[in-house]
Structures are given as structure tokens and as C-alpha cells.
Image (tube, rainbow, N blue to C red):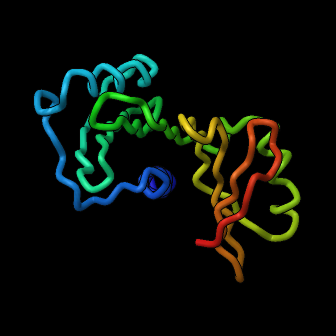
Amino acid sequence: MNTTKNMIAGLLMIAGFSVHYPAKAQQDIPAQVRSAAESKTGGYKITQWVSDRQGGKYIATVLNKETFRIIEIDTKGKWLRTSQAFQPDSVPDIIIQALAAYVKDGYETDNYTLVEDAAKGTYYTVDLTSDDDDTTLYLSTEGKVIKKEKR
């Protein structure tokens, strides 16, 4: 369960989500926003909506036994980003191979996320933790490091 909580926290941070934004009822979400989000759920039901007025977007959450996704849609219904958490045993081999050097250097890995972004493309994020360092690693779908960002 702790891993699930960590994944949720990591995805919410990636989405720029704050728990201070109020949840919205499905009927309060504009139709074009609902439609855009539903096209990105992978067939799963949206479990929560949040309005991020400051960010000018709506955030749809899909949380069930099979998946955890955060879908961001702007107020006009344009898809912005989808973030999907993975359990460690579901991470693609190419990403595991890219992380091997970090693990060898003493890092622990956590919060595996696939991000599909309208502006930045598709990439993975993984949190790395050691005694001296807390970093989020951004990796291309080919397993190449895009950037490292201290947390």
C-alpha cells in the first residue's frame, strides 16, 4: 500500500496537482473536457475530477486495481498530458536497463511513471534516492536520460 501512496504522490507532483483544489462532480465538468479526458482513460472509468483554476485546466484521475492515471485537459477541452504509474514489475526492460547503473551506484528506484505530454512528447520518470541524493530521472522511451532534477 505504501508503494501505491508513493506512486500517487509522485504522479500528483508531476501533474502540478495540489490537494487544495476542490474535487468536482462529473456533471460540473464541461462536455468537451469530459470527452477529451475519456478518450485518454484506456477504457477505465474516471474516478475523480479536480478543477485547477490557477493552472487553467481540469485534472481527471483514474484509480483502480489495474491502473492509476492522471489526465490533464485545458478549459477548452484540449488534452495536455496523461501520466500513468507503473508497478516495478511492469516497467519496460529498456528502462530497467537504463536504471541499472544507478542501482549499482547505490540508488533505490521508485515511482515509475509514463508521461505522454502534448508539448514534450512521451517519456518516463523515475525517482532515485540515495543517502545523499533525491532526484527525479527523466528518460526517453529508448531509455536515454533526458535530464536529472533534484527534489
User: For residue 39, which quarter of the picture?
Assistant: top left
In the picture, measured across the screen, residue 37 lies left or right of residue 122, that is left
Q: Could you say which is closer to the camera, residue 30 or residue 61? A: 30
User: For residue 103, which quarter of the picture?
Assistant: bottom right
Residue at (77% x, 43% y) in the render: 95
Q: Name the residue furthest front.
A: 76
| Relative image position of residue 47 (x, y in whole percent) | 27, 33
Quadrant in which the C terminus appears:
bottom right
In the picture, measured across the screen, residue 63 lies left or right of residue 132, that is left
Q: From what the image shows, is residue 39 above or below residue 115?
A: above
The total number of labels drawn is: 0
| Relative image position of residue 149 (x, y in whole percent) | 66, 66
Q: Could you say which is closer to the camera, residue 62 or residue 3? A: 62
User: For residue 19, which quarter of the picture?
Assistant: bottom left
| Relative image position of residue 134 (x, y in whole percent) | 64, 73
Residue at (41% x, 16% y) in the render: 43
| Relative image position of residue 111 (x, y in whole percent) | 58, 53
Residue at (66% x, 44% y) in the render: 124
In the picture, measured across the screen, residue 50 lies left or right of residue 41, that is left
Residue at (45% x, 36% y) in the render: 80
Q: Name the residue furthest bottom.
A: 132
Q: Could you say which is closer to the camera, residue 64 or residue 44? A: 44
